[in-house]
Amino acid sequence: MTQQVQQHQAHSPAYFEQAAEDEIDIRELFAVIWRGKWLIVACTLVFAIGAVIFAINQPNIYRANALLAASDQESNKLSGMASQFGSLASFAGINIGGRTGTDQTTLAIEVLKSRQFFKDFLDKYQIKNDLMAAKGWNPVSGELSYDPEVYDAQTNNWTREVKAPNPVEPSMQESHGVFIREVLSITTDKETGLITIAAEHISPVVAQQWVSWLIKDINQVMQQRAQHETKANIIYLKEQLDKTSVAQMQTVFYQLIEEQTKTLMLAEANDDFVFKVVDPAVIAEKKVKPKRALICVLGTLLGGMLGVMLALVRHFAKGNVDA
């Protein structure tokens, strides 16, 4: 019965009338688009020109990256100490079991992204101008140019306009935010454990220098931390050794002092304390962004879609007014 009703409705005049209305609507839609073709062309042209101008004015950005591996010597040494003397050290109040190779690498990465490390890096190499005000790079002379509305290179004064309480010269926290968001990237391959440290800048020379400096400094910082911690452990163990007269405890302290001394010697002798460079950073020959062709295509498509939407809105708004 239901099938018969459906067949009857399919052959009824109302059905054909509805189908005809749908077909007319589609034709009308294309007709509206055709009538608004000049509006669509104008919007597309404006957005295309704007996209081209925007893409041309964007400076080239270059990326330098280095491939690193965790220092096996440090990892194996600390792992061996943790397994052999972990319980003895815990009894004596010394913690060596938590510093495995993986933990050291993770800690080094977090230190590398920290505000304190960046502050020391900023003060040591005086990179604030290149980070916050660089506008262009001359591939022939290798010199950077700066945005005059931000920084005056001749007078060495910051000229940007900011709202209070922000200072005219970018603060350490502001510079750190830009460095983490726009410059530095650190990735770890889960399968191999290899780490890639990369930096982006309008100058490929600057990007390469920053990556090299970062690797050198993080190894030095972690090396100094380990030395300071180990020296403090040795001092503490010697103090405890002087306080006890039990032969077994003295043996334990002698063993711990010996191992801590070996660790100190390892830290002082190993420049690649945390990271070993597998593939050093080089000066990039090709930019990584902007993708100017993609910007132009997307801008043109956006203009065309906006033009079609404006043509449809204008037609239906006019139809509602006439009704």
Image (cartoon, rainbow, N blue to C red):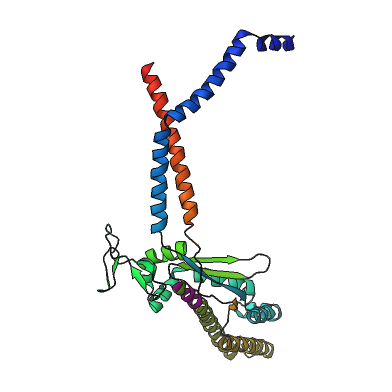
Q: Is residue 105 above or below residue 297?
A: below
Q: Position of residue 85 (x, y in %)?
A: 68, 81
Residue 256 placement, left or right of 52 = right
| Residue 99 visible from this viewpoint | no
Q: Using the rendered view, name the quadrant where residue 139 is placed.
A: bottom left
Q: Using the rendered view, name the quadrant where residue 190 is placed.
A: bottom right
Q: Using the rendered view, name the quadrant where residue 92 is placed.
A: bottom right
Q: Position of residue 284 (x, y in %)?
A: 51, 71
Q: Position of residue 191 (x, y in %)?
A: 68, 65
Q: Is residue 261 magenta?
A: no
Magenta stretch mostly in which secondary structure? helix
Q: Name the foreground residue: 268 vs 56.
A: 56
Q: Residue at x 48, y 61 (%)?
A: 289
Q: Residue at x 54, y 66 (%)?
A: 186
Q: Position of residue 21 (x, y in %)?
A: 54, 17
Q: Which residues are magenta?
A: 206-214
Q: Quadrant of the N terminus?
A: top right
Q: Is residue 17 above or below residue 266?
A: above
